[in-house]
Amino acid sequence: MNRPDADADAGEKTAAPENTSRRAWLRKAAWTAGAAALGGASFGLAGLPVRADDSRLKQLKLSWNAGAICTAPVPVAVKQGFFAKRGLDVELINFAGSTDQLLEAIATGKSDAGVGMALRWIKPLEQGFDVKLTAGIHGGCMRLLATRNSGIVDLPGLRGKIVGVSDMASPTKNFFAITLKKLRIDPDSEVRWRQYPVNLLGEALKKGEVHAIADGDPTIWMLRESDHLYEVSNNLCGEYQTRVCCVLGVRGTLVRKDRVTAQALTQALLDATEWTANHPAEAATIFAQYAPQADVGQLTAMLKSHTDHHHPTGDAFRKEIALYADDLKTVGVLNGSTDSNRFASRVFSDVLV
C-alpha cells in the first residue's frame, strides 16, 4: 500500500501545468455547471452545453452500498440529472466487499470515488489509503433497539447486557461503544457484543440470545416497526444531532490532478442530497428498487428522519472528521498517538474552493 505524503496535495498542485487564471476559469465553469440551462442542455466542465448522452461528459465510477437508504442521494443524482448537469457520466458500482477493499479500489483507480460511513472509513484511512474525504452527506440512520418489556430504556440500561450487531467493526457498533464510553460505561467489559448475520438480528432478540440489537436503516427501521421494538437510542442524540455520519471519498490522484472533476462530483452529490431532503417521497421512489423489503412510504419516513440538510464541507467538515477521530481513540479503534487534527487535515480535501 502506498502511503501518500502529507504534503502531496500542495506539491502536485504547484507542479500542475495550468496557470492561476486558467484554474480560476475552470473552477468558475464547474461551479456554474447545471445552474443554467439552454435549450434543455446543461453546462459541462469546459463551460460548453452538454446533454446526458453527450460524449463530452466525463466518465467516472462511483462505489456505493445499494442496500443502505442513507445512500439514496446517489441514485437521485443519476435519475434527476445532477451528475450530467455537472458534466459527468457516472457509473454506479454496488460494492459489497470490505471497507479496506473499497478504499483500495478507490486509491488504485478501479473506482474514482465512494460513499460510506465515517465511522467505518476512518480507521482504514489512518493506514494511509490515498483517498480524500470531500464532503459529508447526512446524519442519522443508526439505531439501537430493545423489546418493550426488556426494561432497557436508555444506554445506561445496557450495563451487563448483550447487544447483537451485524459486524464487530461496524459503524453502528463503534458509535454505540463511543456513546457508552462517554457515559462512563466500559463498552468492552461492561457490555457484551455478539455478531449475527443482519437478517437474523431480530430472531436473536426474540429468542433472548441478546438483550438489544443495533444496526442501520433500512434493516433496523423495519425490525422496529414489524416487531414493535423500542428505540433506545440513535446517532442523532445529544452532540450528534449536528454530526454527519455518511461521507464522500474521492481518489487522491483525481483530487490532485483533476480537481475540477472532483469538485463537480462533490457538488453534484451535494445538490442531490439537498434535493433528497426537500423531496423525500420522490427520493424514496427512486431508491425503492434497491430496498424491496420496504415500501415507498416506509422509505420516505426513513429519509425524513435523517438529516440530509446537514452536508458539511470545508473547515466544518474537517472538524467533524477530527471529532470522530477523537471518539474512535477513546474506544481503541484509532491509535491513541494519532493527532486527530493532523489526521483530519491529511484525509480531507476542500475541493469546493
Image (tube, helix red, strand yellow):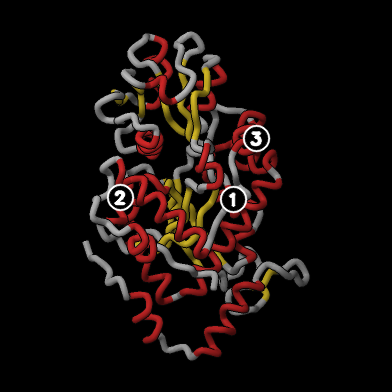
Check the picture and name the quadrant holding the N terminus: bottom left
The tag earlier along the polypeptide, 1 or 3, is: 3
Residue hosting label 1: 310
Q: Are marks 2 and 1 in contact (CB under 8 Å)?
A: no
Could you tell me residue 307's position as x and y percent? Answer: 59, 44
SS state under label 2: helix
Towards the viewer: 274 or 7: 7
**Amino acid type, label 1:** His
The residues tagged by marks 1 and 3 sit, at their Cα atoms, a distance apart of 17 Å
| Count of marks, rendered view | 3
Callout 3 crowding tier (Cα within 10 Å): few <14, some 14–19, many ≥20: many
Give the residue at mark 3: 300
Instruction: Report the side of 193 relative to 14 (left or right).
Output: left
Disc sitting over residue 107 in the figure: none
User: Can residue 259 be seen at all in this image of the molecule?
Assistant: yes
Residue type at mark 3: give it: Thr
Please tell me which residue lies in front, 183 or 127. 183
Name the spot of residue 247 as percent of width and height, x first: 47, 52
Q: Circle 2 is placed at which residue position?
A: 123
Residue appearing at x 59%, y 50% in the figure: 310
